[in-house]
Image: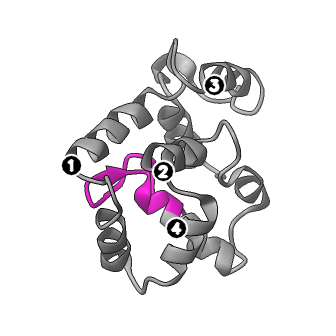
Amino acid sequence: MLPPPRARLADCSWLPRIAAKVREIRAGALPPEYLARFCAPDSVDHYFLQHFGLTKEAVIEAVSGCENEAEVAEWFTRLPGVDGDRIAAWNARGESLGQPGQPMEERLRAVLATTYAHLDHSRIRSIYDVIERDEAAPGS
């Protein structure tokens, strides 16, 4: 099971989730639907990488070389330009993905009408909300 989108490492949301995805890929355990969207354009992974000036390959290599979460946090915080302000900006941006006028707005509408039609939409405001509700649903 992946950490929720709002889980933090080095005070950065999504970092524990993308690191867990890399580990599951290497173990051959990431479900196919997650593997297909890993770092895809118009995915949270993509926006995370873009925000921090990273590539998919760089994250895979770095996380693969880390023994634990503390090493991932150390690698991440040593990246050029990664500081508290940049992390705070990402945390706010990540929370806004899918909201009106924000990246992934159209994707959120599309998946709520199809893949996630079974979810209660009344409290869904962002992509993070969809992921959390879907993964908390029975049978997920």
Residue 95 in the image: above or below residue 73: above
**Front residue of this view, candidates 128 and 67:** 67
Q: Rounded to the nearest whole Å, what is the CA distance between mark 1 and mark 2?
A: 16 Å
Q: Residue 45: x and y, percent?
A: 57, 49
| Residue at left offset 62%, top offset 60% | 56
Residue under label 1: 84
Closer to the chain start, of discs 3 and 4, is 4
In the image, is 112 to the left or to the right of 50? Answer: right
Residue under label 3: 108
Question: What amino acid is at disc 3?
Answer: Leu
Could you say whether the residue bearing mark 3 is in a helix, strand or loop? Answer: helix
Do the numbered discs 1 and 2 sit on residues whose CB atoms are within 8 Å?
A: no
State the extent of the magenta-drawn residues as a range.
2-18
Q: Rounded to the nearest whole Å, what is the CA distance between mark 2 and mark 3?
A: 24 Å
Residue 11 in the image: above or below residue 67: above
- Dot in front, 2 or 4: 2
Closer to the chain start, of discs 2 and 3, is 2
